[in-house]
Amino acid sequence: MDRSEALAFVQPHLTKSRFEHTIRVTDTAIELAKIFDASIEKAELAAVFHDYAKYRDKEEMRRWIEQEYLPKDLLMYHHELWHGPVGALLVKREIGLGDPDILNAIRWHTTGTAHMTILDKVIYLADYIEPGRSFPGVEEVRELASEDLDAACFEAAKNTISFLMSKNQPIYPDTFHAYNHFINVLVKKNWRQQNGKVGK
């Protein structure tokens, strides 16, 4: 499936502004994939479909979560989190796109999780830093994104947690797992650098 075909599938499901966001995320994902040696083709498709279920009816998404293999604890959190996991399910069912790498990147693009693949991180970050985004901390993450994927994802997770805490909103556990994972990764990287063992 090429980009134009994928966008044709997605466009009817999105508002004009969300479709434009999707195009920006796709362009950003391709740039990140080139920098960090991820599959450009998979990054492109995952980015195009990342918000496929964004505007699905809440009750429909609730039914998918209740009836399918999706984590039931999603129902305890804001419905904004549902469109990633539900979207991955629907992209497989309705579009016939079964590549697990692409589906996982769609699934985790909002919450993040521990042990994300490079592709997962590319989509997570592309959604966060695409050029249309404007909020405190995003410029710092953009600067990191061209140099260190893990550091950029860590800052994105940290900023997300701080924002949700400032609003007294519950935080999905996988976002904390992502934050903790990236802390451990960065500590190990720093240790290697300090001990002359970069790349080992």
Image (cartoon, rainbow, N blue to C red):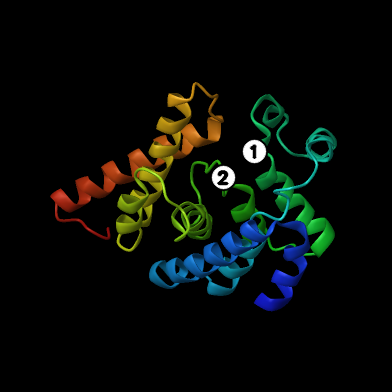
- Residue 42 point in image, percent of width and height: 60, 68
Residue 64's place in the image compared with 16, above or below, is above
- Residue 6 point in image, percent of width and height: 71, 71
Q: Quadrant of the C terminus?
A: bottom left
Left-right relation of 140 to 167:
left
Left-right relation of 127 to 184:
right
Residue 181's place in the image compared with 16, above or below, is above
Furthest toward the front, the residue is 16
Q: Earlier in the sequence, mark 1 or mark 2?
A: 1
Q: Please, what secondary structure does the residue beneath circle 1 have?
A: helix
Q: Nearer the viewer, residue 189 or 157?
A: 157
- Per the image, the residue denoted by label 2 is 110
Q: Quadrant of the N terminus?
A: bottom right
Asked if labels 2 and 1 touch by Cβ distance under 8 angstroms, the answer is: yes
Q: Amino acid at mark 1?
A: Glu
Q: Please, what secondary structure does the residue beneath circle 2 have?
A: loop
- Per the image, the residue denoted by label 1 is 80
Q: Nearer the viewer, mark 1 or mark 2?
A: 1
Q: Residue at x 53, y 57 (%)?
A: 123
- Residue 89 point in image, percent of width and height: 76, 50
- Residue 176 point in image, percent of width and height: 47, 32
Confirm whether residue 65 shows in the render.
yes
